[in-house]
Image: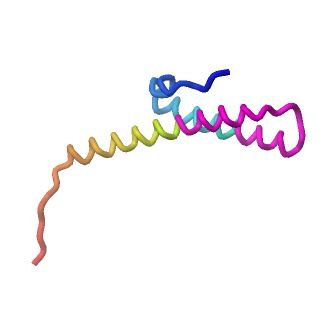
């Protein structure tokens, strides 16, 4: 199973991105729980793939936040007021 591609993440909407982040965090928790309790067969590469996907999702979310902040900063005029 290859690692997920970043292009797939970039094509998601903001809402889908948030849902995916929550789902990945939930999956990681369930996987750690299974490993700790010895339930089922845990494959170590599953952790790698989920963490990789989570980092992609969080990175794209942060990039969008920064882009939104920058666009707000450039559209909002700064008033030059001095207090004497």
- Whether residue 42 sits left or right of residue 71 in the image: it is right
- Whether residue 25 sits left or right of residue 8 in the image: it is right
Does the magenta segment cover residue 16? Answer: no
Q: Residue at x 16, y 55 (%)?
A: 78
Q: Specify the segment rendered in magenta.
A: 28-56
Q: Looking at the rendering, in which quadrant would you find the C terminus?
A: bottom left
In the rendered view, how is the structure colored? rainbow
26 and 57: which is toward the camera = 57
Residue sitting at the far bottom: 84
Residue 2 vertical position relative to residue 22 in the rendered view, above or below = above
- Whether residue 14 sits left or right of residue 38 in the image: it is left
Residue 81 vertical position relative to residue 74 in the rendered view, above or below = below
Does the magenta segment cover residue 44? Answer: yes
Whole-percent x, y for residue 30 in the image: 76, 39
- Whether residue 28 sits left or right of residue 74 in the image: it is right
* Image quadrant where residue 41 sits: top right
Q: Residue at x 44, y 42 (%)?
A: 62
Residue 39 vertical position relative to residue 10 in the rendered view, above or below = below
Tally of numbered tags: 0
Instruction: Assign the magenta stretch its main secondary structure.
Output: helix
Q: Looking at the rendering, in which quadrant would you find the N terminus?
A: top right
Whole-percent x, y for residue 72 in the image: 27, 44
Q: Residue at x 40, y 39 (%)?
A: 63
26 and 35: which is toward the camera = 35
Whole-percent x, y for residue 21 in the image: 58, 37
Whole-percent x, y for residue 81 in the image: 12, 66
């Amino acid at each position: 199973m290859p690692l997920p591609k970043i292009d797939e993440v970039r094509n998601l909407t903001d809402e889908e991105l948030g849902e995916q982040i929550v789902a990945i965090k939930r999956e990681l928790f369930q996987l750690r729980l299974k490993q700790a309790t010895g339930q089922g067969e845990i494959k170590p590469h599953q952790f790698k793939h989920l963490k990789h996907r989570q980092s992609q999702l969080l990175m794209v979310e942060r990039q969008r936040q920064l882009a939104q902040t920058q666009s707000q900063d450039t559209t909002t005029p700064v008033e030059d007021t001095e207090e004497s």
